[in-house]
């Protein structure tokens, strides 16, 4: 029987409210009632970086796709953008009157745009370099925004509120391209290749109900659904290569096929509120609440799970359409790397807990001074998986 293994416990007295993984799962960030955003090494639980505190609890976090920026939102409606390379606060984004409920970066290295949703009923798109929002979806006093996600090609953004899921063209403030009425939607996820969007719905309230996993085909505009659990779906994660996803509920883990949409395997593993999950070829990492600590990170060996429909040969591929790699007509032409920086960038410095692992995020020369010492990071080719050599000199 597959069981989750405790990798480490998040120590402290402050309850976790949110977490997010980097794209390869090697690092994660957490936030909560302690008003801090902290970056961790997921292999051992060591803290790498700690951001200066917000004035209220941190409710949402998001990395950009190069791990150079971290967005943190709080219960007062403020969004902070942290420049991790420079180890400083880059922007304070003030445009919401109530708490932040979701954050997402535009999926491009050239376009520095962030989406923020709030309890005030609005989702805003921010040009980070100009420090201003340029597009708003929803309305003040409307249904609370619950979740948001950009499509991989950057053309679409999906927005879930308490009453529906709406799919918008990112370049237009016009009517939504699709409007899906549903109960308690959440966990919006676009597939990285196939033109499908996953989301969860929950029919319960005070009276127990059912959670469903829904697959929306962006080409046919058709939705297929399957009842997954009598308890609420906490998280959805795609397998990186196989046509399955991992669904975490209050009563366990389920492997669900995308074509056909049905449960292939399940693990009884009750969770105390899941904050985020990450799936690789071999493991599923889960950050959730813990009875004796603010939170913990669990690891599941997914190689021991059934990842295809039992007694059925795996097909050569899906019949669904795929996202284009090029992005003609998207925001990249208007909000690109050449946009001027706002001149009011703040200088609050990030506390670096582990210099060597901090250096592993980046691949260029940088000098970081701490406590009278200068750490010199030698450049090394590669991405976040390559660990540069760090030497220390007095001075």
Image (cartoon, rainbow, N blue to C red):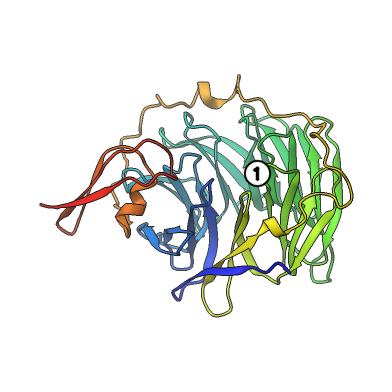
Asked whether residue 203 is in view, the answer is: no
Residue at horizontal 45 percent and vertical 44 percent from the top: 67
Q: The N terminus is located in which quarter?
A: bottom right
Residue 315: give x, y in percent of width and height. 83, 37
Mark 1, residue position: 240
Classed neighbour count for the residue bearing mark 1: other residues with Cα under 10 Å, few (<14), some (14–19), many (≥20): some
Residue at horizontal 32 percent and vertical 53 percent from the top: 356
Judged left or right of residue 391, residue 78 is: right
Q: Is residue 329 above or below residue 267?
A: above
Residue 382: give x, y in percent of width and height. 41, 37
Judged left or right of residue 76, residue 46 is: left
Q: Is residue 364 above or below residue 199?
A: above
Residue 111: give x, y in percent of width and height. 49, 30
Residue 256: give x, y in percent of width and height. 79, 53
Report the number of numbered marks. Answer: 1
Judged left or right of residue 317, residue 186 is: left
Q: Is residue 56 above or below residue 172?
A: below
Q: Which residue occupies the extreme left position in the image?
A: 395
Q: Which residue occupies the extreme bottom position in the image?
A: 292
Between residue 110 and residue 253, name the one nearer to us: 253
Residue at horizontal 61 percent and vertical 31 percent from the top: 154
Q: Secondary structure at mark 1?
A: loop
Residue at horizontal 70 percent and vertical 72 percent from the top: 270
Between residue 265 and residue 190, name the one nearer to us: 265
Asked whether residue 11 is in view, the answer is: yes
């Amino acid at each position: 029987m597959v069981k989750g293994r405790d990798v480490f416990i998040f120590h402290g007295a402050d309850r976790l409210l949110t977490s997010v993984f980097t794209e390869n799962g090697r690092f994660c960030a957490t936030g909560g009632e302690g008003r801090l955003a902290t970056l961790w090494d997921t292999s051992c639980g060591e803290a790498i970086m700690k951001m200066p505190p917000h004035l209220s609890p941190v409710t949402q976090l998001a990395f950009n796709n190069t791990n150079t920026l971290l967005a943190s939102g709080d219960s007062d409606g403020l969004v902070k953008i942290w420049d991790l390379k420079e180890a400083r606060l880059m922007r304070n984004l003030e445009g919401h009157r109530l708490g932040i409920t979701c954050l997402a970066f535009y999926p491009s290295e050239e376009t520095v745009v962030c989406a923020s949703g709030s309890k005030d009923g609005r989702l805003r798109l921010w040009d980070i370099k100009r420090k201003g929002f340029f597009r708003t979806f929803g309305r003040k006093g409307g249904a609370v925004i619950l979740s948001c996600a950009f499509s991989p090609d950057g053309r679409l953004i999906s927005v879930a509120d308490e009453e529906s899921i709406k799919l918008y063209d990112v370049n237009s403030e016009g009517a939504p391209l699709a409007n899906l009425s549903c109960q308690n939607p959440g966990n919006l996820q676009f597939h990285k290749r196939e033109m499908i969007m996953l989301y969860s719905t929950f029919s319960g309230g005070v009276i127990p109900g059912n959670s469903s996993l829904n697959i929306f085909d962006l080409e046919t505009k058709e939705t297929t659904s399957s009842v997954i659990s009598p308890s609420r779906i906490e998280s959805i994660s795609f397998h990186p290569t196989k046509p399955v996803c991992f669904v975490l509920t209050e009563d366990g883990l389920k492997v669900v096929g995308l074509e056909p949409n049905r449960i292939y395997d399940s693990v009884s593993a009750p969770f105390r509120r899941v904050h985020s999950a990450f799936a690789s070829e071999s493991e599923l990492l889960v950050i959730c609440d813990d009875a004796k600590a603010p939170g913990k990170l669990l690891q599941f060996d997914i190689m021991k799970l059934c990842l295809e429909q039992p007694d059925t040969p795996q097909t050569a591929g899906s019949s669904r359409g795929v996202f284009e790699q090029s992005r003609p007509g998207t925001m990249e032409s208007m909000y690109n790397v050449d946009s001027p920086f706002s001149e009011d960038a703040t200088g609050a410095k990030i506390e670096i807990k582990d210099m060597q692992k901090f250096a592993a995020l980046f691949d260029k020369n940088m000098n970081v001074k701490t406590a009278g010492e200068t750490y010199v990071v030698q450049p090394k080719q590669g991405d976040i998986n390559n660990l540069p050599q760090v030497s220390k000199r007095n001075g």
